[in-house]
Image: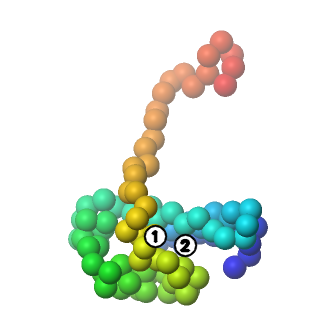
């Protein structure tokens, strides 16, 4: 993979991105549903994790030697949208 580029694996209702780090490694983020038939909530075992990534991101799996540890040890957070109007104050953004 290009070491100085953002990589994106878009899917229908979710995506994974890989952001480059100065040392040439990448930080991956999975944007995925918390709950549902296929979600963080239903991906419980190591086999579930391997199966999901193997089916959805087969080209990325060989590049993630610590996939299982990373999936288990990193927190699951929420992505939020904040809407406000006006989005400026005294003619300044």
Q: Identify the residue at horizontal 63%, vertical 68% (top origin).
A: 26
Q: Helix, strand or loop at disc 1?
A: helix
Provide residue 77's location: percent of width, then percent of height. 40, 52
Q: Residues within 10 Å of mark 2 (few under 14, many from 20)?
A: some
Asked if one can make out residue 13 in the rendered structure from this viewpoint, the answer is no
Q: Are marks 2 and 1 in contact (CB under 8 Å)?
A: no
Q: Is residue 40 left or right of residue 81?
A: left
Q: Identify the residue at horizontal 47%, vertical 77% (top origin).
A: 67
**Residue placed most toward the observer, 84 or 41:** 41
Does 15 appear above or below 55? above
Q: Residues within 10 Å of mark 1 (few under 14, many from 20)?
A: few
Does 64 appear above or below 28? below
Q: Helix, strand or loop at disc 2?
A: strand
Q: Which residue is mark 1?
A: 70
State which quadrant residue 48 falls in.
Answer: bottom left
Provide residue 89's location: percent of width, then percent of height. 62, 16
Q: Label for residue 9?
A: 2
Quadrant occupied by the N terminus: bottom right
């Amino acid at each position: 993979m290009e070491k100085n580029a953002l990589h994106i694996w878009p899917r229908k209702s979710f995506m994974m991105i890989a952001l480059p780090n100065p040392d040439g490694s990448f930080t991956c983020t999975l944007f995925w549903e918390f709950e549902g038939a296929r979600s963080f909530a239903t991906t419980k075992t190591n086999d579930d994790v391997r199966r999901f990534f193997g089916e959805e991101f087969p080209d990325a799996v060989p590049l993630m030697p610590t996939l299982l540890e990373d999936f288990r040890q990193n927190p699951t957070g929420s992505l939020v949208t904040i809407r406000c109007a006006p989005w400026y104050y005294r003619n300044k953004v």
